[in-house]
Amino acid sequence: MIRGALLLVALVLVGCTTGRETVSVTTVDPRAEVAIEDLRGRLVTVDAMGNIVVTRPDGSGAVAITDDAGEDAAYAQPSWSVDGTRIAWSEVSRVNGVALGVSDPAGESRFSLAMEQPPFYFNWAPDGRTLGVLRNGDPGSIAFELVDVAAEETRVIDSGVPYFLSWSPRSDRLAVHVDGTRFDLLEPDGSITRLGGSSTRYAAPHWTAAGIFHLGTRGIELTDPDGASRLLVATPGPVTFVANPAGTKLAAQAFQTDDPEGVGVALVQTQTLPGNSVVVIDVATGEMETVTRRISAGFFWSPDGESLLVLEPELNSATAAVLVWRDGQTGRVGEIGPHPLFVRDVLQFFDQYAQSHRLWAPDSNAVALPGAVDGDPGVWVYRMNGEDPVKVADGSWVMWSAA
C-alpha cells in the first residue's frame, strides 16, 4: 500500500534532509505547570499481558476491563468514545469468537458483537452513538461497518481498498476516500454522493467545522458538503495532512526526494508545500510556518488546536524525537523508541488515526505514548513543562479520553 511506502520514505529521508528547525526551550507551554496526578481524563491501555486496563493519567486507580488475555483471548486497539462513556476494541476469544467488544470504563456493562473478521480500526462519531469500524471483507477488499451501540446492531454499508473516512461534525454522514479514486459523501444507509476529483497521492480526508480537507487534482483543497472547493496549497508529491479540531490550522508534509524546496504547479497561483518538511498552514490567510525541516513519522493536534505533537525519527536510531510546536516555536520534550505495534497500526496511517486516536490530555498539557525510554518499555506521559517523561504503566497501547 502507498502508506507503507510513505512511512519507509519518511524513515529513509531522515538521513538526507537538512537539520531540524527547532527551538531549544525548557517549557513548551508555560501554562502547563501541572502535577501528573492532577492531569485530567483517563488512559486506556493494553498491558504487558494483553489485557485492556483503564487508569488515571498517573497510572493509579487501574480497572481491568479484561483479565483473560493469553491462550483464551486476544484484545487489540481499545478506543474511547468521544464522550468518554464507552470503550470499543477488537477481540478473538474462545468465548466470543471474532468480535467487537464494548464496555463502560468501569467494566460493568460489557457486550460483544460477532463479526466475520477481526476489526482493525475504530472511529467513533462525535456524538458517541455510532461507531465506524473497518475490517477485512471480501477477498481483496475492506468492509466499512456501522455499529449502533445502544441497539447493539451492526451492518456493512460500504467497501473498497484502501479505505479512509472522516465523520461530519454533526455525526450524520461521512467523507470517504476509497480505492484511491473515490471522494464521496457516505450516508448511514449506504447511499453515496460524489464530491469530485481525487488523488491517489493522499490517504485520509478530514472533515471539520470549516469543511472537508482533501487532496484534489490541483492540491490540498477545502470542500464544503455541496461540492464547492477552494485550493489551499499546491503539493509537489504525495502528502499527509491533519487539521486542528476547528479547521483553522492544517499541518501537512509533502514527500519530495529531489527538491526539498518544493515544486511549483503551472498556472496555479498559490503557495506550494516545501518538500520533506512539516508545516502549519493558517487556513484563513494561507500563511505557512515551518515546524521542522525534516520528514516526521506522524503528527497530532492538541484538543485546543494550538499545539502540534510531532514524532521525528532520529538519525541512525530506532528512536524518535518528541517535538511540540506551539505559538510559532518547536520544542523538544523528550524522545522515545515507539512500540512496534504503535508504528505498525498508528504511525503508518497517522493522518487517519489522528482523527480518532487521542494521545493528548484533555487540557492540551501532556501527551501519552507507548514505547521505550532509555531502554525501559511501557506507557509514558510527557508534560509540556520541560520535566522528564513519567512511566505510568506497562504495555503496548495507550489512548487518552476526551474529558
Image: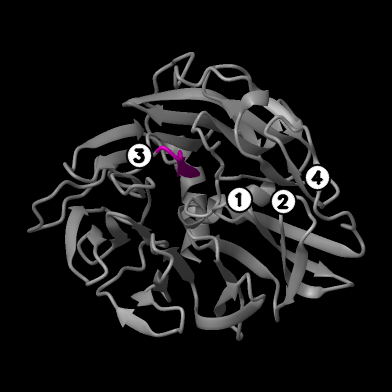
Circles 1 and 2: CB atoms closer than 8 Å: yes
Q: Amino acid at mark 4?
A: Val
Q: Which residue is mark 2?
A: 105
Circles 1 and 4: CB atoms closer than 8 Å: no
Q: CA gap, disc 3 to disc 4?
A: 41 Å
- Categorize mark 2 by other alpha carbons within 10 Å: few (<14), some (14-19), many (20+): many
Q: CA gap, disc 3 to disc 1?
A: 34 Å
Q: How is the image coloured?
A: one colour
Q: Which residue is mark 1?
A: 84
Q: CA gap, disc 1 to disc 2?
A: 8 Å
In this view, the residue in front, 27 or 181, is 27
Magenta residues? 297-304
Circles 2 and 3: CB atoms closer than 8 Å: no
Q: Which residue is mark 4?
A: 63
Mark 3 against mark 4, which lies toward the viewer? Answer: 4
Q: Amino acid at mark 3?
A: Ser
Check the picture and name the quadrant holding the C terminus. Answer: top right
